[in-house]
Image (cartoon, rainbow, N blue to C red):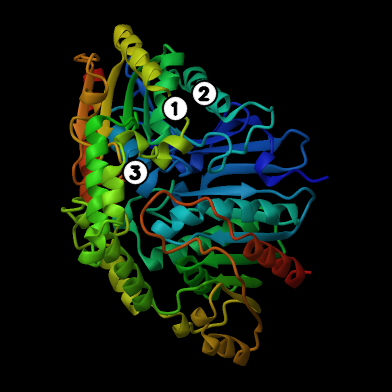
Amino acid sequence: MTEQGVLLSQSLVGVLTKADEETDTTRPTVVFLNAGMVHRVGPNRLHVRLARELARRGFASLRFDLSGIGDSPARIDGSSLHDAALRDVRDALGFVANEHGGSTFVLVGLCSGADLAFRAALADERVVGGVLIDGFPYHTFRSRLHRRARQVAWQLRGRNWRKLLGSNSPVWKRLRNSPQAVPSPGAIRQRDVPSKDEAKAGLHALTERGVRLLVVNTPDRDYGYRRHFVDTFPTVRSDQIQVRFFPDANHTFTLRANQDQLMRTITEWISCFK
Amino acid sequence: MSADPATLLFTPVRAVPNPASNGHCDVRARNGDDRRSARARFFGPQGRLFGIFDEPDTPSDRGVVLCYPHGADYDSAFRSFRILGTRLSRAGFHVLRFDYLGTGDSWGDTEDASIGQWTEDTVAAIHELRTSCDLRQVAVVGLRLGATVAAFAAADCGAVDQLVAWAPVFEGRDYLDGLRALHQQWLKDERRSGRAKSAADDELLGYRLTPSIRGDLESLSLLSLSKLPAPSVYLVNQEPSADRPEFAAWLRARGANVDTDVIDGPTIWSRSPSMPEASVPNRSLQMIVNWIAGASR
């Protein structure tokens, strides 16, 4: 395995990881996208560990910083964050294609990285796969129930029961509110999330194009539960989409056991591209 | 007018394989008006350490090595260190930010890491910056465990002119206890939410705590320094309670010029595991830049 610092396009800092064996250009190159503001090494260095494990299995990968994140300077061309991020990904794929011979790609993203991976996959036909971790942050009826149950449990924790069960209790107030009154989670407000309809249409388009997706969810967000993807997109059925739920994990896979499980899941899934 | 650190525009220069670093490449980027440049490359023994080299606008024979904190602190401090590096380069310094072995983009995993190894890595970084840029003066800035490692490395190599110890870890055991308490609190909250049932004993806030690192930390004491790390030392804390006057007194007794400050601002370490916040302690960063600029004249 070798790694080298690379400069993509005009400004983006990254590290390219290659397997020892001769590069097999029929295998896709894996491209890791920033998880929120975390720089290219990923939360808890997850991208670095994954890149090296994938290299041992013969897959080259690139981890890089989008403009304005980590070591990459912000663009000063006036483009929106949305456009800049898509252009950054396109430039990164172009760099790998031109300089290192990769012609197809698998995008890996967590949180906002999943949103971007989804959009970039739709925009670029060189993308043949995606690992979308805690993407599609849409509420379902069940996710609202889960959320309300957690709120109530939190309210009851260590509080005065008489006060809590009185008529002015915040618990009753919350229960009286309709599910629609629940504010959207912060993640949705802060992330550049595609609309649910856009996501649904996009998933159909990707599966028709033959793109394979690994959808990973954790319960660390208001919307996360085992059947969340199926409940959110009941009409999206395809053998090309694998869904995995990590009931024990938090959003950034803090525990090593969860990190190791995620790495196993991704490395096993990616073997479908051999 | 100088460019804003967040808006430096780089132009690419083709990557050149470094034969001495097992296929690693040295890439160099310059801003659009050719006044500032930066490099991202592997360096050190077998090219195993990853560093970002920020270069000043004008020729300079002064440089600064930045030593990251460790573990979860590294994730949350990264952005502030990038900004600190840019500000120092704008103030006329060559700057090297680097990842210790087994951290960040550098080679190895946690199993390869130890405080002794990171001290050697820091000495290698000081040597790299000094020789590659032909420097007359080198300062080292470290945060938390990075400050302690920087002090030991500076004392080992005897080639550091200024040391900035930002919220240093004075006693490794206290540091470890603090991280364990934070980790346990986080675990408690997670378990209350039905998660984190598979936590192992040998991990802290997302990173493995190997027996080697645990042993190193349990015996680590900044007060056990045997030699003066640098002739000038700046001790920065953000909480008065974190100050250890006996360390400053020890340094002064050995002839060092010591400045101390307690600076208000957001702490960028010891956070609960979540997405690192984007907050930057601007005042602390500027005070550090000003002190180095003043001390290195």
Q: Which residue is mark 3?
A: A46
Element assignment for label 2: helix
The x and y percentages for residue A25 are 36, 16
* Chain letter, disc 2 residue: A
Type of amino acid at the residue the image marks with label 1? Leu
Residue A147 occupies which quadrant of the picture?
top left
Local SS, label 3: helix
Residue B23, visible in the rendered structure? no
Which label is found at residue A265?
none
Q: Kindly indicate whether the residues beneath marks 1 and 2 are on one polypeptide chain.
A: yes
Q: Residue flagged by tag 2: what amino acid is it?
A: Leu
Q: Which residue has dot 2 on it?
A: A86
Identify the mark nearer the N-term, 1 or 3: 3
Task: Report the residue at 45% width, 74% height from top.
Answer: B169
Residue A116 lies in quadrant? top left
Mark sitting earlier along the chain (2/3) = 3
Which residue in the protein does label 1 denote? Answer: A116
Q: Are marks 1 and 2 in contact (CB under 8 Å)?
A: yes
Q: Nearer the viewer, mark 2 or mark 3?
A: 2
**In the picture, residue A240 is in which quadrant?**
top left
Residue lying furthest top: A208
Q: How many residues crowd around disc 3 within 10 Å: few (fewer than 14), some, or many (20 or more)?
A: many
Chain of the residue where label 3 is placed in the rendered structure = A
